[in-house]
Image (cartoon, helix red, strand yellow):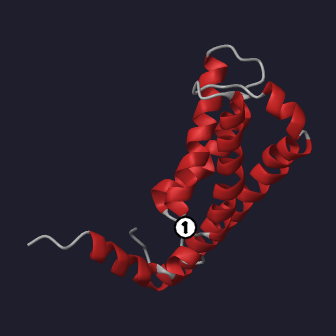
Amino acid sequence: MKVIDPRLAPALEKARDLGLLAQRIGAGLLIWTFHMRPKLLRFDEELREFPDPLGIGAPASLALALLSEGLCSVLVALGLLTRLAALPVVFTMLMVLTMAARGFEGADVQSALLYALPYATLVATGPGRYSCDHRLLERYRRLYARFIPPRA
């Protein structure tokens, strides 16, 4: 990122990291409040009526959606394994878009896009400095080096 005045660089980096923190927490809160919580409150009904876009059965599809929207969104909000945890949420929302394209009436395209975009952005950008991932960065590097040796 090119900065007009080099003295502004630290402030711009801090603003970017605060923006990523707000995005992670905001996306997690939104998906929990408006997507996950209703599924849990109407669990029996969801279990009977949940679609099966992958052909693995409605209960298994619901379980995957709950893991994606529940566990993965919490990991993203914490900034823990952020890029990896954001992928299932994006995939789940892509399944909603696929169902909408096939004419499924319960699929809300606008919501799916609004949930998918912040998570897709976090896959591309990472979680920022104010995250568990940043605090664990050195451990991640050592683990990576242990399993994938450097090229000669």
In the picture as drawn, the residue positioned furthest to the right comes out as: 41
Residue on which the image places disc 1: 127
Residue nearest the viewer, comparing 55 with 34: 55
Image quadrant occupied by the C terminus: bottom left
Quadrant in the picture for residue 60: top right
**Residue plotted at (29% across, 70% down):** 147
Above/below status of 75 relative to 30: below
Quadrant in the picture for residue 72: bottom right
Q: Name the spot of residue 56 as percent of width and height, x first.
A: 60, 29
**Image side of residue 15 versus residue 44, left or right:** left
**Residue plotted at (61% across, 51% down):** 118
Image quadrant occupied by the N terminus: bottom left
Residue nearest the viewer, comparing 116 with 50: 50
**Image side of residue 33 versus residue 125, left or right:** right
Q: Name the spot of residue 138 as percent of width and height, x first.
A: 41, 84
Q: Name the spot of residue 143 as percent of width and height, x first.
A: 36, 76
Above/below status of 79 relative to 83: below
Secondary structure beneath dot 1 equals: loop
**Image side of residue 122 versus residue 147, left or right:** right
In the picture as drawn, the residue positioned furthest to the top comes out as: 103
**Residue plotted at (86% across, 40% down):** 43
Give the class, few, some or many, for how many residues have Cα within 10 Å of label 1's Cα (few <14, many ≥20).
many
Amino acid type at image mark 1: Pro
Residue 12 visible in the shown view: no
Residue nearest the viewer, comparing 97 with 55: 55
Quadrant in the picture for residue 102: top right
Residue nearest the viewer, comparing 73 with 52: 52
**Residue plotted at (62% across, 43% down):** 116
Above/below status of 115 relative to 28: above
